Amino acid sequence: MPSNMKTTIHAIVTETLVHFRSYNIISKNYIMLYKYCKDRLLFTKISNRKLFLLVLFQILILTSSFFIGSSTERRTIVKTLTPEEKLIIIREHPDSFSKDTLINLLKELNVKYPHIVLAQSIIETGHWTSRIFNENNNLFGMKEARSRIHTAKKTEHNHAYYETWRESVYDYAFYQCRYLSKLKSETEYFEYLGKNYAEAPNYVANLKRVIKNENLVNIFK
């Protein structure tokens, strides 16, 4: 059970006992509980069984609302995903970054034109040496998205911050699914990057140079 749920349950149980305390006699260890009977003008003891059922009822209400709320939220998120985004399965991996693990993840996610994506990573991070990569785990110079699903946690150094480098790759995959999935050729892909992604005027030329010099196409054959 999540710790925040435990805290909430504890608060509800405590609140229930305090509520009774306002007009009941409760022993210091909260084992003996009494209620006032107006007809008999007496305090009558509440059985432990009734007390247990009361607390159990409170817990059931809380847990039901928690799971119903979580389920509703998950269904709402899923409904906003495109068919391509639904194909992306995010898993947690404890391994550290390397060029090979990046290549393997690009293959696993079946990203479009992975050699171009790998070249983007190389250029955006200076072969994975930049501050944005080392401090933000940001492989592609991405900014925190505002109008699509993303995996960034916040913005730092004017760029998206990710808890792991893999989350940066997932974010690019979501970006590609949302904006580039309908492009039918490398030419269209380069044109889109040049107009909508690049900040440097020679961005596309640099991508093509890296792809050729490092033989990136063959890596994904």
Image (tube, helix red, strand yellow):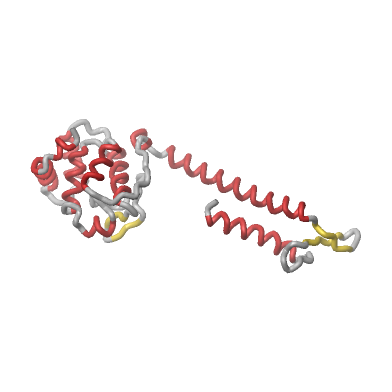
Say left or right for 18 vs 2: right
Q: Name the residue at 67% across, 52% down.
A: 58
Residue 118: x and y, percent?
Answer: 20, 43
- In this rendering, the count of numbered labels is 0
Residue 97: x and y, percent?
Answer: 26, 50
- Check the image and name the residue furthest to the top: 184
* Vertical comparison of 65 with 110: above or below: below
Quarter location, residue 156: bottom left
Say left or right for 219 vs 75: left
Q: Name the residue at 60% across, 45% down.
A: 64
Q: Can see residue 146?
A: no
Q: Nearer the viewer, residue 44 or 105?
A: 105
Residue 219: x and y, percent?
Answer: 17, 37
Q: Quadrant of the C terminus?
A: top left
Q: Name the residue at 47% across, 42% down.
A: 74
Q: Name the residue at 83% across, 62% down.
A: 36
Residue 153: x and y, percent?
Answer: 36, 54
Q: Nearer the viewer, residue 126 or 80?
A: 126
- Check the image and name the residue furthest to the right: 40
Q: Can see residue 3?
A: yes
- Check the image and name the residue furthest to the bottom: 28
Q: Nearer the viewer, residue 162 or 75?
A: 162
